[in-house]
Image (tube, rainbow, N blue to C red):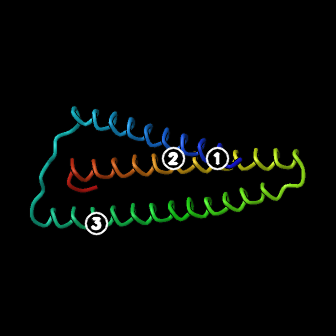
Amino acid sequence: MFDSVFENLRKATDMTIQTQRDLFKRWVALWEGGPAFQPVMGEKAQKVQKQWAETVTEAMKRQREALEAQFNAGLKSLEAAFAVAGAKDVEEVRAKTVELWEKSFDCLRKAFEAQASEFQTAVARWTELATTGAP
């Protein structure tokens, strides 16, 4: 019973990863015509390094929060999957399975949207630092 659920989840995850790869390739392709890099020196370089460190730190904190949310959602999904096994009749199994399926794909969608948004924010911030040397 759970084999098909896990197989579908694996396929959805694979598709998500492939979509992210495709998006990344497209975004990188846009950089060919982007603004030129402007090297910075001296005090301005130290300021940019500090801002870059802050940007990376913030991004890592948001990534940790997103991973914690995904981990918690995974634990809840496991609990829900075990609750399906405790169903008393066929209708209850169906209802719990559909609910589990909907919640799983909703979590997957939210995780993908958060990752895409975070990537977009990080690229925008990096571009801003790389092209202007300061925000």
Label whose residue precedes the other's in the sequence (1 or 3) = 1
Which mark is drawn over residue 53? 3
Mark 1 and mark 3: Cα distance apart in space: 44 Å
Type of amino acid at the residue the image marks with label 2 = Phe
Eye-nearest disc, 1 or 3: 1
Label whose residue precedes the other's in the sequence (2 or 1) = 1
**Residue pictured at 15% horizontal, 62% vertical:** 45
As rendered, which of 59 and 48 lies closer to the eye?
A: 59
In the structure shown, which secondary structural element does the residue marked by tag 2 occupy? Answer: helix
Task: Describe residue 64's horizontal placement relative to residue 51 as left or right.
Answer: right
Eye-nearest disc, 2 or 1: 1
Mark 2 and mark 1: Cα distance apart in space: 23 Å
Which mark is drawn over residue 3? 1
Task: Determine which residue is flagged by label 2.
Answer: 112
| Location of the C terminus (image quadrant) | bottom left
Eye-nearest disc, 3 or 2: 2
Type of amino acid at the residue the image marks with label 1 = Asp
**Residue pictured at 90% horizontal, 50% vertical:** 89
Q: How many marks?
A: 3
Task: Describe residue 60's horizontal placement relative to residue 102 as left or right.
Answer: left
Residue 44 location, x and y as percent?
Answer: 16, 62
In the structure shown, which secondary structural element does the residue marked by tag 3 occupy? Answer: helix
Name the residue furthest left.
42
As rendered, which of 83 and 56 lies closer to the eye?
A: 83
In the structure shown, which secondary structural element does the residue marked by tag 1 occupy? Answer: helix
- The answer to whether residue 9 is above or below residue 34 is below
Residue 127 location, x and y as percent?
Answer: 27, 47
Mark 3 and mark 2: Cα distance apart in space: 25 Å
